[in-house]
Amino acid sequence: MSNLESVATLPEPGLLASHAEVVFPIRDQKQLAIKDLTEGFKQWRIWFMLAYQDIKIRYRRSVLGPFWITLSMAITVYSMGYLYSHLFHMELQNYFPFLVGGMLAWGFISNTITDLVETLTMEENKIKQIKLPYSLYINKVIARNFIIFVHNLPILFPILLIFHETAKINLCSLMLIPGLILFYINALSYGLTLAMIGARFRDVTQIIKSLVQVVFFVTPVMWNPEILPPAKRFIANLNPFYAFIEFIRCPLIGTMPSITSWLMVSVITLAGCYLSFKLFCRYRSRIIYWL
Amino acid sequence: MARIDLRKVSVEFPIYNVNARSFKKKFLRLATGGAVVKDANQHIVVNALKDITLTLKHGDRLGLIGHNGAGKSTMLRLLAGVYEPTSGDLRTDGHVSPMLDIMHGIETEFTGYENIMQRGTLLGLSRAEIKAQIQEIAELTGLGDYLSMPMRTYSSGMMVRLAFSISASIKPDILLIDEIFNAGDADFLEKARGRMIHLLNQSSIVVMATHSDDLITEFCNKVLLLEGGQIKYLGDPGEALRLYHN
């Protein structure tokens, strides 16, 4: 009880003097943003655990557990594959692998996007109670969707067996790894931006959700761009979602993404990293007040 | 050595009304040159904390008192790193453990044991560290076999027991506490109190917000009396309580 000399309503000279020795950290927004990102990555144990538990909670009292994800996806893609191959007059063995691969990729991408917009608003309680990097929550959402994606992969196995002439596992399948890494980088960068916008403007979540629906129909997920007249192919080629879908779909069925897709993904990735980093530096410290 | 320094720290909250949050309104404002929703951007700013200068060193036990809305919780969240100062400088040395809402991170679908794992990980413990302590935590809860049951089967008192026991098992340098001595039955309170004192003694710096005068006089060597986000008094607990009650 001896160290309570500071009895004052205003800060005493003594108190201020003691500050002279203290070196306060300079609040550089850029460094704080970088720290948030690196810390968010380093604490992977936390976000991986949270992501896994999200899925566990969702299916806790069900018999099939997370394999409900697989089952419902399987029913969707198998019935769509059969019906649409006849609708579009496509060869079953060409169309079926194309559609299944595309639907897996699309499910992964679209769910990640819609989840990312809500990330910060959904985690409001946690964010206000404990200091964790904002990027940790983004990583968590990506990890959760990645786990779901992996759960969906077994749907592909029957396809690889039945249509082994058009869909196979080969060297191109290895392209899935850089594809997923690029997907992660983009999900993180665009995710930060989307989550910030979603926290600041609450109706953006609804806007994004309906936009994603539209994107599904204008993107070659269930229709092959080859059925477009050559003069209209640009509709597919200029669509960034198509490039990302190609990056996941092609390795799944053993083909290579086109040069156009590579160019598109590179441009989108660079632009996203630059823009998101700028925005994150500028608005990171404001996020807490938007929640 | 843990240490906290604040120099002229202020925290300002912009209050966003519903209009300002809507993208549609923002768009309308752009499109109409501001005539339609003229008042949408008039944010009200609340000065939650103003000009706080304070130094805490090893061994300090600071009590935060003040009326509702005086800034106690904001102060704790500022020290926890949740809020960043709008102006002024803040430096904290040491691992901070916030015990602001002890029910935070409790998932009712999970069993007691699973919650211990989850909460421990969130607080920065490794798997091995949690494993090493799990027995001790289980004993403190006194819940026995209930720990293997989902927490939705617990009574609210039992939940508090578990939540408290997990929080109390970490050994932080800086401990931040927000009103937690009001839960559980008498038997548990006795146990919790012992544990709490142990925890307080282990921490290098403790900052607690409380309405209990007994706690202040028993534990604190300094008291910060806040009023409207400003320091009304900083120093001797007895004097602070006298000012507070007048």
Image (spheres, coloured by chain):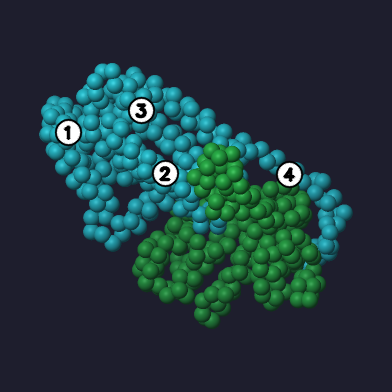
Chain colours: A cyan, B green
The answer to whether B42 appears left or right of B186 in the picture is: right
Residue B135 picture location, percent across and down: 45, 65
Q: Residue at x 49, y 71 (%)?
A: B160
Q: Nearer the viewer, residue A125 or A147?
A: A125
The residues tagged by marks 4 and 3 sit, at their Cα atoms, a distance apart of 48 Å
Mark 1 highlights which residue? A96
Of marks 2 and 1, which one's residue comes earlier in the chain?
A: 1
Mark 4 highlights which residue? A24
The answer to whether A123 appears left or right of A78 in the picture is: right
Indicate the amino acid at tag 1. Phe
Q: Nearer the viewer, residue A280 or B4?
A: A280
The answer to whether B157 appears left or right of A146 in the picture is: right
Q: Which mark is residue A265?
A: none
Of marks 1 and 4, which one's residue comes earlier in the chain?
A: 4
The residues tagged by marks 1 and 4 sit, at their Cα atoms, a distance apart of 62 Å
The residues tagged by marks 4 and 2 sit, at their Cα atoms, a distance apart of 43 Å
Please tell me whether mark 4 or mark 3 is closer to you in this view. 3
Helix, strand, or loop for circle 2?
helix
Q: Counting other residues with Cα less than 10 Å from the Cα at mark 3, is it few (<14), some (14-19), or many (20 or more)? A: some
Q: Residue at x 30, y 23 (%)?
A: A257
The residues tagged by marks 3 and 1 sit, at their Cα atoms, a distance apart of 22 Å
Q: Are marks 2 and 1 in contact (CB under 8 Å)?
A: no
Q: Counting other residues with Cα less than 10 Å from the Cα at mark 1, is it few (<14), some (14-19), or many (20 or more)? A: many
Q: Which mark is residue A207?
A: 2
Helix, strand, or loop for circle 4?
loop
